[in-house]
Image (cartoon, rainbow, N blue to C red):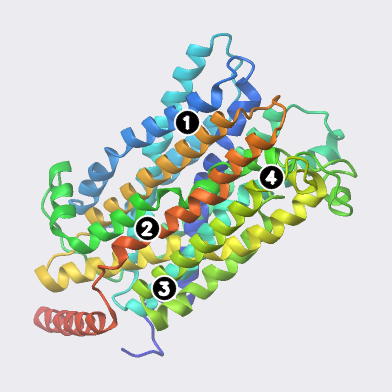
Amino acid sequence: MDKKQPILPFKSALIYAIGIFGVQLFIGYINSFQTEFYNKMYSGLDANIFSVVAVIILVAKIISCIADPIFGALIDRSHLKGGKMRPFVLMSAFPIAVLTTLMFVFIDFSNKYVMYVYITVTTVLWNVAMTFADIPSQGMLALLSPNPEERNVAAGLANTFKSIALAAPGVFVTVVMMILDAVKGQGNYPDKTYYLLTALLFLVLGTGLYLLIYFKNKEAVVSTSSNAVSFKEMFVELKNNKMIRIVFLTFMLGFARNMAMGICIQAGGALIGKVYFPLLSDIFAAGGELDPTSNATWLIGITSAVTSMISIVVVPIINKKWGEKKTFIVFAIYGFAISFACMLFYVLLPSDSALRGGLPAVWAHWVMLALIGFMFGPHGYLPMVMTSDICDYNEWKTGERHEGVCFAILSMSNKISNALSVAVGILFVGISGYNATAEITPKMQNIIYVAYVGLPGIACLLSMIPMLFYKIDAVTKAQMHADLSEKRKQAAEQTL
């Protein structure tokens, strides 16, 4: 292949990554702020709102999993002029944008049961819309180029932008609050205002960026049409395709790896509380206190975000040398060791330790979370690369490509994992007794810290187990892509 004329130029790979950033903004906003929005808006109707919402989110995400094979089959059976994935990028952009905004419209309920019905319906609809966007946006990766190295570049960029997008909503909320403070004065607006304004901002920004995939990316791989795919056939694929089953199991066993993201706001409120931070308070809170649940949601996780970004940038380089299997295992062991050590350190702190709140707690968590942040690099990148390779592997072995099914399984795996992660994390918050008006106690802090740091580390170690059996190594890849390249060359010559 002529390296001077790449099929997927870096600019196109970057545009794809920016498009992923757009759709992930919606997901990051929901994951980080949905439960806190309900806590601040509706906890007066029911003090147990965290526990109830945890169950609603779990049920809604499991129900929405039915949409994965439906959309996967729809994509695999499609014969649209724009390609296999691109038309569905266009069709999926507006539902997820509109529903994300709707989730943050405050309604003054007088009955908690009506409130929970509304929360359930909107949560289910949003998760279905998320699936509709997730499958084609990730599935495009396998079609951007037949060259695995070019796809790996796109996957690395996409994973980097995805991680930024998942963490970015906290920064956007802070910026919106700063603007409102400048216009109306600090505290002269209700919480519902900055939630809705941030959602509207994402409606415009996220939609525009996501649609770049449709308008600027092309499908360089012609995907063969598969037979109709049912739920049963999807599970048959899991049963018969060992490689995609490994990807699925890494998500299931490692579901708690992303638990910190879902409860970061509650963790900030419980582990740090409101704090005056010289200079930062002047910049972000007009000289007042920084609140990890509102104007400084980024405060507790800022260092882990930095080190996570470093690992995300480095992982593709390491993976190029080590391969998916070794990279996954090394990071999993590291994640467990550092997370478990930090958890033991924190839960053994005396109840009156200065590290349990205020500015000393900020510094302590910054140090610990900076070390923990390195473990997150492989989570988004490696499964996408592996699934793309598995699509090639299937074509190599059977002559058929099943991007829709394989990426539907990837999406379903991610969704079930995320459902368990969010639900279990929020349940731990509920069990701890935390809410908007609760008194913070050392026992509450310990329970939340186990969910915030300890369980993600244990999940990292568990997720490593299936990877011990992953077989698509460098030698297999080289032979596979050489054979496929020759096959496609011969097919092209026959059509001339």
Residue 398 vertical placement versus 79 (above, below): below
Numbered label attached to residue 54: 1
Q: Position of residue 495 (x, y in %)?
A: 11, 78
Label whose residue precedes the other's in the sequence (2 or 3): 3
The quarter of the picture where residue 494 lies is: bottom left
User: Residue at image x 40%, y 31%?
Assistant: 125
- Quadrant of image for the C terminus: bottom left
Distance Cα–Cα, label 2 vs label 1: 23 Å
Q: How far across and down, in percent of the image, does residue 300 sit?
A: 69, 50
Report the mark closest to the observer, 1 or 4.
1
Residue 388 in view, yes or no: yes
Q: Secondary structure at mark 2?
A: helix
Mark 2 lies on residue: 463
Quickly name the residue at label 3. Answer: 327
- 37 lies left or right of 132: right
Q: Residues within 10 Å of mark 4 (few under 14, many from 20)?
A: many
Between marks 2 and 1 in the image, the one whose residue lies nearer the viewer: 2
Q: Tell me which label, 4 or 3, sits earlier in the chain.
A: 4
Closer to the N terminus: mark 2 or mark 1?
A: 1
